[in-house]
Amino acid sequence: MRRKITHFGAFLGGFLFLLASVAGAELLERYSARDTLAPPADEQADARDCLEQLVWTPEDFQVRWKGVRRDALRTRLVFPSPVPSGDPINDRVIVDWYRPWRESDAEASGESESESRPAVLVVHEAGANMPVGRMFAQAFQAEGFHAFLIHLPYYGERRSGVSYNPAVGLRQAVADVRRARDAIAILPEIAADRIAVHGISLGGFVTATTAAIDPSFHSVFLLLAGGDLYDLLMRGEQDAARMRRQLERAGYQGERLRDLVWPVEPLRLAHRLDPARTWLYTARDDRVVPPENSRALARAAGLEGGHHRELVGDHYTAIVHFARVVREIAERLRAAEAACGAGCFEGRGADRGEDAAADRSASRCGGRG
């Protein structure tokens, strides 16, 4: 009798799995997370004003965890935006989780599959299907990291046909990236004190502002980004010019355009970035994000030496450096992990509680700036 029950249970389990696969995505789990948003005080009045417009009251939130059909190493996280736009599809934040290729990497590193490992949150470019963001996520996955690709407001699976509201979308993007860090940190496979963030082009601007709110990300990597958004929109060509025309059609030009981008201007908070843990990659002949705008961000963030790399090429041809950038980011993450050990950054994130001991530990491994 017991054998029959066992066989029936196996059959039922297989049937349910098949049914979920046919449906597309299998709902695996739902769990609770909480915002750890905790911006340090700032002496600059303008920075304080900027923070007041960006932060929200921390709260508990639900995260759904789904498998993705035909991809055993990709999972999808779904959680509510902390800054809703009123569009239910857009307000459902989606983050694709690319699990590392454990078969080869775990053997090479000597780690077991049960050990928590570093993660990289990728914030994509201004492409509807996020092709460059996906490339980076898959490359970090191949390097042995947990990679997460967030869908920014009105991109990817968050497109609903409702007109984009830039007045809400810009602030929402910053908030969603910050909350994504907390949704990732609670996963048992993830080392919560070793979550890096990598922003590309549009995602680089969003990341520069988000990472400056509080020191929640272990490392910050910005690609083809800069500062002075209004100036960039007015002078930049190609993608920047296209975005300017879209905003003009929506009624944003002149002072109205300046007021629109001012709340998320990276230069207002760049001094809060830790220059020892921030790297900026830009292109020498970039006409979308002019070099003057990139250098302005580097100066404001105090990035010196190898922390600001000017690559040969423009906003599009710089893709030839893709493998090099991925390799350098991976090497820096591994070097930090090796130098600090598993507990070096414990206490850095607000979810683990910061104290004097954590500050001393962080300072031994590069400091907070």
Image (cartoon, rainbow, N blue to C red):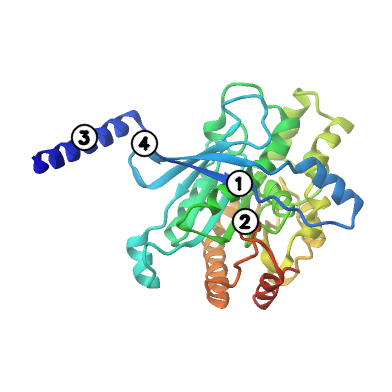
Task: Label 1, secondary structure: give it.
Answer: strand
Could you give the CA–CA distance between mark 1 and mark 3, rounded to whole angstroms? 35 Å
Q: Which residue is mark 4?
A: 26
Q: Is residue 90 left or right of residue 257?
A: left
**Image location (x, y in percent) of residue 296:** 81, 56
- Tell me the kind of residue under disc 3: Leu
**Image location (x, y in percent) of residue 28:** 39, 40
Residue 242: in sight, yes or no? no
Could you give the CA–CA distance between mark 1 and mark 4, rounded to whole angstroms? 24 Å
- Give the crowd class for mark 2: few <14, some 14-19, many >=20 residues within 10 Å: some
- Give the crowd class for mark 4: few <14, some 14-19, many >=20 residues within 10 Å: many
Q: How many marks?
A: 4
Task: Label 4, secondary structure: give it.
Answer: loop
Q: Earlier in the sequence, mark 1 or mark 2?
A: 1
Could you give the CA–CA distance between mark 3 and mark 4, rounded to whole angstroms? 15 Å
- Give the crowd class for mark 3: few <14, some 14-19, many >=20 residues within 10 Å: few
On residue 351, the disc is 2
The residue sitting at 47% across, 62% down in the picture is 117
On residue 12, the disc is 3
Q: Earlier in the sequence, mark 2 or mark 4?
A: 4
On residue 34, the disc is 1
